[in-house]
Image: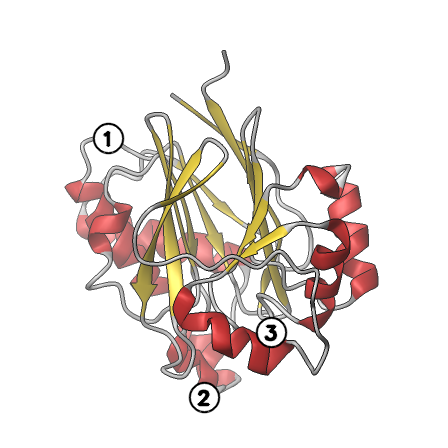
Amino acid sequence: MSSSLYFKSLCSSSSGNCLVLWTDHTRVLIDCGLGSMKRTRQMLREHLGNPLDIDATIVSHMHGDHIGYYPLRVLEDYGIKVRVHEECLAQLKQKHFNGYGFNSLRLKPFSDGPFTVGDLTFRAFDLPHNPFFPTFGFAIKYKTIKVVVATDFNSWDDSLGQFVDADFIFVESNHDLELLRQHFNPNSQFHMPNPETGKLLCCARKDSRKAPQAVMLGHLSLIRNEPDIALEEIEHAFEDEGTDLDFRLLAAPRLEASQTVKISV
């Protein structure tokens, strides 16, 4: 029997975020911020085949690049379960229902404890982001495999332990500090700059008994970052700390799908 877990980013930027994680028996989306109904249907069909095979969509927070009215309409049409943290439930309805009833939406809140979707076990953890939007990362277990997904945060002091001994990490590396100076955006204060992501990954690697099989950088700014810059800054962080970068380091395309990453026992 297969003991592998698979991951793909369908898109990852301030223009939209949608990740997919699957095993032989379970398939979940993490966020579905694909903008329009047309694009949501198109992306799900192109990359997942029959969208009815999606077991659930797990939503990290209520910003429109992670969930929205039109993707919710598609998820309702396809009968796909939508899981949001109980702290976000009222905000989801206020911000994204737009007066539409969503009477057939399969909405099921989760809390701070572990919850399962098929053969995957999720545990949400708090991320410091915009104070008006409760935001969560996820530590996900499949057999002995541990995956961590965390975007939209600006400090990692309280969440370092979540990244330790992960087999795969998808983490925000939002902006380059020099490009931010050239193209200032006050909202960047809510996101992780490349050097901080590098420090987080260095500390997690030092505290881990083993290297992750891969790390993928996500939520790169369209204007204030470039994949090559983000990758180089992470590499420099490891060099500065004298720590071996002994895992695959990837950057998710901002508007397109990434390669599939296979994580094995």
Residue indicated by mark 1:
210
Q: Earlier in the sequence, mark 1 or mark 2?
A: 2
Crowd around label 3: few <14 · some 14–19 · many ≥20 (10 Å): some
In which quarter of the view is residue 166 placed?
A: top left
Q: How many marks?
A: 3
Q: What residue is rendered at 56% in x and 33% in y?
A: 26
Q: What percent of the width, then of the height, locates residue 160?
A: 22, 54
Amino acid on which the number 1 mark rests in the picture: Lys
Left or right of 80 in this view: 111: left
Do residues under tags 3 and 2 come within 8 Å of each other at their CB atoms?
no
Q: Nearer the viewer, residue 42 or 211?
A: 42
- Name the amino acid type tagged 3: Gly
Determine the CA span between mark 3 and mark 2: 18 Å
Task: Please tell me the numbered disc located at residue 64.
Answer: 3
Left or right: 88 in relation to 107 = left
Closer-to-camera residue (141/163): 141
Residue 13: x and y in percent read 58, 64
Residue shown at 45%/88% (left/top)?
A: 186
Residue 132 visible somewhere in the drawing? yes
33 vs 93, nearest the viewer: 93
Can residue 8 be seen here? The reply is no
Q: Residue at x 79, y 60 (%)?
A: 39
* Disc 2, SS: helix
Q: Quadrant of the C terminus?
A: top left
Residue 125 falls in image quadrant:
bottom left
The image position of residue 49, as x and y in percent, is 77, 37
Placement of 127 over or under 188, stated as above or below: above
What's the amino acid at mark 2? Pro
Which residue bears the numbered disc 2? Answer: 186
Q: Position of residue 51 (x, y in %)?
A: 73, 43
Q: Mark 1 near mark 2, Cβ–Cβ under 8 Å?
A: no
In this rendering, the label closer to the viewer, 3 or 1: 3
